[in-house]
Amino acid sequence: MSNLNIIEQKIRDKAVVELMQIIEKFENDLGKLTDTYGHKSFYSFDKDKSTTCMQPHEFRNQLMFSLKNMFLENMVKKKSSELLEKLEIL
């Protein structure tokens, strides 16, 4: 693996960690609601208006999948650009 690939992978890993922190904060906030009001399942609402009950780990996985699809590539591009600016390459 070249140095550039290693750097890009480290940036990608850092972005995934950032997404995980967002999910963990969200889960902690949901945990407070669960502790107070006693609900332990999450629901997925599909376009056809059907509803699926998910366990917390399924909800977490689905949320991470969605956030990666929505943000990961743009996060890597932005963080790469910021790194290059810091190194005064751009």
Image (spheres, grey):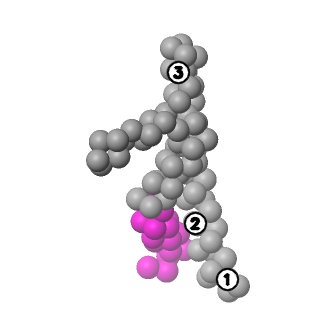
Amino acid type, callout 1: Asn
Residue of label 3: 39
For image coordinates 56% across by 49% down, the residue present is 61
Give the mark, 2 or 3, whose residue is nearer the N terminus. Answer: 2
Residue of label 1: 3
Q: Position of residue 21 (x, y in %)?
A: 58, 44
Amino acid type, callout 2: Arg
Query: In the rendered image of this protein, does residue 77 appear above or below residue 19?
Result: below
Can residue 82 be seen from the camera position used here? Answer: no
Q: Residues within 10 Å of mark 2 (few under 14, many from 20)?
A: some
For the stretch drawn in magenta, the main secondary structure is helix
Q: Is residue 24 left or right of residue 52?
A: right
**C-beta proximity under 8 Å, tags 1 and 2:** no
Give the mark, 1 or 2, whose residue is nearer the N terminus. Answer: 1
Q: Residue reaching furthest bottom?
A: 2
Q: Quadrant of residue 77?
A: bottom left
Q: Nearer the viewer, residue 65 or 22?
A: 65
- Per the image, label 3 sits on a secondary structure element best described as loop
Q: Nearer the viewer, residue 24 or 44?
A: 44
Give the mark, 1 or 3, whose residue is nearer the N terminus. Answer: 1
Query: In the rendered image of this protein, does residue 67 appear above or below residue 22?
Result: below
Q: Residue reaching furthest left?
A: 48
For image coordinates 44% across by 40% down, the residue present is 52
Per the image, is 39 magenta?
no
**C-beta proximity under 8 Å, tags 1 and 3:** no
Q: CA distance from mark 2 to mark 3?
A: 34 Å
The span shown in magenta is 71-90
Residue of label 2: 12
Q: Residues within 10 Å of mark 1 (few under 14, many from 20)?
A: few
Can residue 10 be seen from the camera position used here? Answer: yes
Query: In the rendered image of this protein, does residue 89 appear above or below residue 20?
Result: below
Q: Nearer the viewer, residue 36 or 8?
A: 36
